[in-house]
Image (cartoon, rainbow, N blue to C red):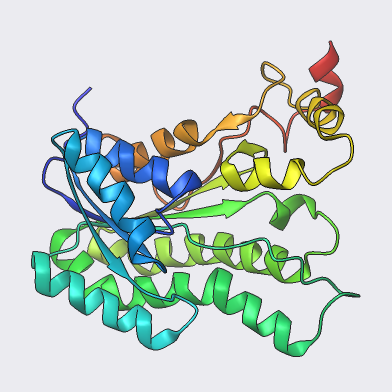
Amino acid sequence: MDLQLKEKVIIITGAAKGIGRSIAEVFAKEDAVAVIVGRKAADNQKVVDEIIALGKKADQFVAELSKPEDCEKVIAQIVAKFGRIDGLVNNAGVNDGVGLERGDYESFMASLHKNVVHYYLMAHHALPELIKSKGAIVNITSKTAETGQGNTSAYAAANGGRNALTREWAVELLKYGIRVNAVVVAECWTPAYETWIETLTDAQEKLNEITAKIPLENRMTTAEEIANMTVFLMSARSSHTTGQIIHVDGGYVHLDRALANA
């Protein structure tokens, strides 16, 4: 299926690793220009070099997205380089464990800047170009907004905000023909997830316990499966889909987990 993304300039935040990296790679495979925005030039460039080595197109820009001025600056740099923006994937963020007991005002607000404020700012600054191109926005969000997790108040609040912004922007941007959707991540195997699981005393046992509760196939979601949905939602093949919050999670959030052992 041709997703009609050839030469489209797509920004992906936090694309140096994990889910963001997979998203950038899938966009590049569809002949889009994958524009990686992240904190570390070397990490960004490694992904860009690998994409270019496959004969595809990518570029990278450095920004600390928790700084509002960096969000504005990086959008200006991208427009100066490419002259257009066709899509924005807000993905960057971190589950930083700022809880109700283990937290304070400063850490809570800092976490919101890391996890949701830049979603707004990147969309705000990219909007003039998205209006011109009739582009689209996809927000990557987390199950924590719906299920809770414990000891992660700020991250859960940020993801609730991401979901709410998805619906709000879908309404506000109808007049421009700009579609806005979200992809919700639950238990997805990434380098960060692997690092976390390995900190546990019985890592394999805990992993088996988690996967046993995932109804479809009793396995983790892959980063590529998140990427595939993201790229589809960005494409013209999903031309009448907007304001949707789509769970790519093997039924983890909404299906009865008793089904996993049926």
Number of numbered discs on residues: 0
Q: Nearer the viewer, residue 47 or 95?
A: 47
Residue shown at 73%/52% (left/top)? 146
Look at the image and tell me in which quarter the N terminus lies. Answer: top left
| Residue 74 in picture, x, y percent from top left | 28, 76
| Residue 150 in picture, x, y percent from top left | 85, 58
Horizontally, is 159 left or right of 233 in the view? right
Looking at the image, residue 12 lies above or below residue 164: above
Q: Quadrant of residue 61?
A: bottom left
Residue shown at 81%/85% (left/top)? 104
Looking at the image, residue 239 lies above or below residue 34: above
| Residue 114 in picture, x, y percent from top left | 56, 73
Looking at the image, residue 257 lies above or below residue 91: above
Residue shown at 50%/45% (left/top)? 18
Does the rendering let one see residue 44?
yes
Look at the image and tell me in which quarter the C terminus lies. Answer: top right
Q: Nearer the viewer, residue 260 or 75?
A: 75
Q: Quadrant of residue 141?
A: bottom right
Horizontally, is 95 left or right of 165 in the view? right
| Residue 119 in picture, x, y percent from top left | 46, 69
Does the rendering let one see residue 236?
no
Horizontally, is 117 left or right of 35 in the view? right
